[in-house]
Image: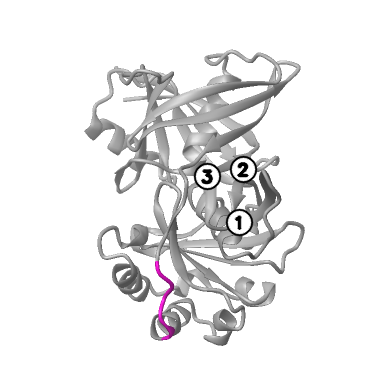
Amino acid sequence: MPSYRFYQIDVFTNQPMGGNPLAVFPDAAGLDQATMHQIAREMNLSETTFVFPPEMPGADYKVRIFMPKGEIPFAGHPVVGTQWLLAHIGRTPLPTPEVVVTFELGVGLRRARVYSENGSVTRVMMDHQPPIFGDPATPAQVAKIAQALGIPVAAITDTGLPVMWVSTGIRQLFAPIRSLAEIQNIDSRHVKAILLSEICAALDPVERANEEIMVFTTDTTSADVHARMFAPAIGIPEDPATGSASGGLAAYLIQNRVFPATLPTTRLLSEQGIEMGRPSRIELEIDGEAGQISMIRVAGQVVPLIEATLSW
């Protein structure tokens, strides 16, 4: 009977039942793609990760990431959470104050810094890629986005900021909202997936901007920026903490001068998941300034929740 140990953790939070849940199988040797997909469907979380010995030079681990719908090449909270878990269970040594670990992913090698204190993991910081920016949406496209979100178009246009896709590893669409009340009033159950898919296809015909949208406002409860992520086209009405999109958001904020760059590195804090009852805190680091951003990093804390064995 096959038997595999796994852990469920909450990522980008310091409290149980907050952040974004993740299942991690730290010793996945022997599992094939079809079985990993079945397990991800059984876990029924946004992502499940499977850890293997590395194949690429320079990698410490190979990690495969599965959603219930299938495998994806990269995602933020699975990378941060899996790095944290491997250090937490002793697979990654913990010299004080940090160790750099490299994952082999579907997008190539990605580095992360694992921070510790007194033998315990405190946080993980993940490198993204230098950003790529799409063209701003047209007024007609912005109006359609407002319709998809169920908000007045002025809630977007009054910010004076563009709607555009950004990639620091995965292309995603970003829309500014003028107030916290308006962003909190968006009903994730009624976000129109078809309209969002049409806009993503029009703005990015090649990759369709991953058919998801992050909305944000600088009107916050206790951070620099308040964000929500909707991805109904891929079966996620709302995501409580999105590491991949947070990298794009960080680049957007500096590129469009929402916050002034503080050279050499600007540090910001994003809050997400509050409307879902899963509050998340995501640390953002941006090297460089508008037009010259050289690196994006995303960091956060993790809380362990479940340790169990899956047998069949």
Give the residue type that dot 1 points to.
Gly
Residue 215 occupies quadrant = bottom right
Camera-side mark, 3 or 1: 3
Q: Is residue 239 left or right of residue 31?
A: right
- The secondary element bearing badge 1 is classed as loop
User: How far is disc 3 from disc 2 in space, using C-alphas?
Assistant: 24 Å
Q: In what element is the residue under mark 2?
A: loop
* Mark count: 3
Across and down, in percent, residue 131 comes to 46, 51
The residue tagged 3 is: 294
Q: Earlier in the sequence, mark 3 or mark 1?
A: 1
- The CA distance from mark 3 to mark 1 is 28 Å
Give the prevailing secondary structure in the magenta stretch: loop
Q: Which residue is mark 1?
A: 273
Q: Is residue 164 left or right of residue 94?
A: left
Counting residues from the start of the chain, the first of labels 1 and 2 encountered is 2
Identify the amino acid type marked 2: Phe
Magenta part of the chain: 135-139
Circle 3 — which element?
strand
Reading the image, the residue beneath label 2 is 12
Horizontal and vertical percent position of residue 46: 43, 47
Q: Residues within 10 Å of mark 2 (few under 14, many from 20)?
A: many
Residue 137 is a magenta residue: yes
Residue drawn at (41%, 45%), measured in percent from left and top?
44
Residue 222 within the segment the image draws in magenta: no
Amino acid type indicated by mark 3: Ser
Residue drawn at point x = 52 percent, y = 85 percent: 153
Quarter of the picture containing the C terminus is: top left
Q: Nearer the viewer, mark 3 or mark 2?
A: 3
> Whole-percent x and y of residue 13?
66, 43
Q: Residues within 10 Å of mark 3 (few under 14, many from 20)?
A: few
Specify few, some or many for label 1: CA neighbours under 10 Å numbering under 14, 14-19, or 20 or more: many
